[in-house]
Image (cartoon, rainbow, N blue to C red):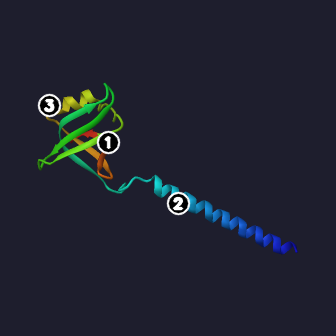
Amino acid sequence: MPGGEARRDNRAVKSTGLMAALVLLAAAALAAPAGCGDAGSVRGRIVEVESDGVLSPRSVAVIDVDGRRWEFEVSDVFGHFTPAHLRQHMLSGEEVEVSYRREGSRLVAHGIEDSP
C-alpha cells in the first residue's frame, strides 16, 4: 500500500515541524528577560559614575528634573560616553538622556546621549 506509507510520512513531517516550532517558541520565551517590554528614557544630571576601567562604565546615577534618583547598570560603552566623559558631564552639570530597559528589578542603560 504505497498511499498509506505516504500519509504516515506526511504526518511525521507535520509533527516534526510542529515540535520544532514549539521548541523555538519556548526557547525564545525563556531567552527574553523578564519585563523586557518595560523600556523608557530619563533626562537629567549625572551624580555618580562607577567604572571598571578607563573605557568601561559599570553604573551611572542620574537625578531627573523632579529630583528622582535613577540608578542604571551599564554593560557597554556608548560612543564617546566613557567613564571620563560621563564624569565631565557630572562636573559640568550638563544633562544627558539615558535610554533603558527594566530587567527584573534592575535598570539597564542601552544608550546615553547628550540632552538637547
Of 90 and 79, the residue lying toward us: 90
* Residue at the (88%, 75%) spot, across then down: 1
* CA–CA distance in space, label 2 to label 1: 28 Å
* CA–CA distance in space, label 3 to label 2: 48 Å
Report the disc number at residue 25.
2
Q: Which residue is mark 1?
A: 111
**Residue 47 placement, left or right of 1:** left
**Residue 21 placement, left or right of 51:** right
Q: Secondary structure at mark 3?
A: helix
Report the disc number at residue 92.
3
Q: Amino acid at mark 1?
A: Gly
Quarter occupied by the C terminus: top left
Can you say whether 72 is above or below 56 in the image?
below
Which badge, 3 or 2, is on the more N-terminal residue? Answer: 2
Which badge, 3 or 1, is on the more N-terminal residue? Answer: 3
Q: Amino acid at mark 3?
A: Ser
Q: Are marks 3 and 2 in contact (CB under 8 Å)?
A: no
Q: Tag 1: Cα neighbours inside 10 Å, few (<14), some, or many (≥20)? A: some
